[in-house]
Amino acid sequence: MGITGLDHTGIVVPDLEQAIRFYTTAFGAEVVGREPDTDVDPDAIGLPGEPVRLRGALLRCGAGLLELHEYLTPRGRESRRPCDTGIGHLAFAVTDIDAMYTSLRREGVTFGTTPQTIETGLYAGRRWVYGRDPWGVLIELCQHPPHWGG
């Protein structure tokens, strides 16, 4: 019994169809499958006493999986801050960070800066930039230096 790897990352979105279009267009993700409107056990999902109904889709992003859910009930709150406890951001490894940065800006991702380069330490040579998708999810683009092997 051991972990074989990360399975998927889940994102809650207010409009599933819009999110599928965004992630397939902006990141080249491919839809693996869709989950129809489904009633979910509220205790199992951590929302005891609330009726839970959602729809979803599973997308392949390179070697990883992205799970999108739209909660029909209950509806969610506004987005979190990057420093709040919990998952801080979703990172995508890219081969050309400048081209991806430009492309994502056209798709509605807002960035606080242009891509940055780390000059010293463990991550020396790594390029990165943070942005927010149209629903406020914090994403990071990462371009690793050649000596990292990819």
Image: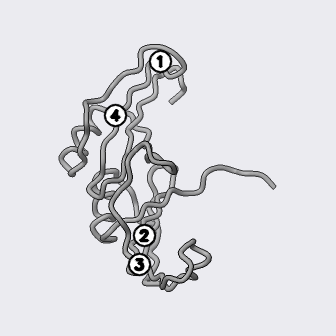
Q: Gap in Å between the C-alphas at discs 3 and 4?
A: 33 Å
Q: Amino acid at mark 4?
A: Val
Local SS, label 3: loop
Three-letter amino acid code at disc 2?
His
The residue that mark 3 highlights is 74
Question: Residue 4 at x, y = what percent?
Answer: 70, 51
Disc 3 residue type (three-letter): Pro
For residue 110, which quarter of the picture?
Answer: top left
The CA span between labels 4 and 2 is: 25 Å
Q: Residue at x 25, y 32 (%)?
A: 113
Mark 1 residue crowding within 10 angstroms, few (<14) / some (14–19) / many (20+)? few
Q: Label 4: which residue?
A: 129
- The disc, 2 or 1, on the residue closer to the chain's N-terminal end is 2
Q: Is residue 128 left or right of residue 122?
A: left
Q: CA distance from mark 4 to mark 1?
A: 15 Å
Give the residue furthest to the top: 120
Q: Earlier in the sequence, mark 3 or mark 4?
A: 3
Q: Which mark is residue 124?
A: 1
Identify the residue at image location x=54%, y=24%: 148
Distance, label 3 to label 1, CA atoms, is: 44 Å
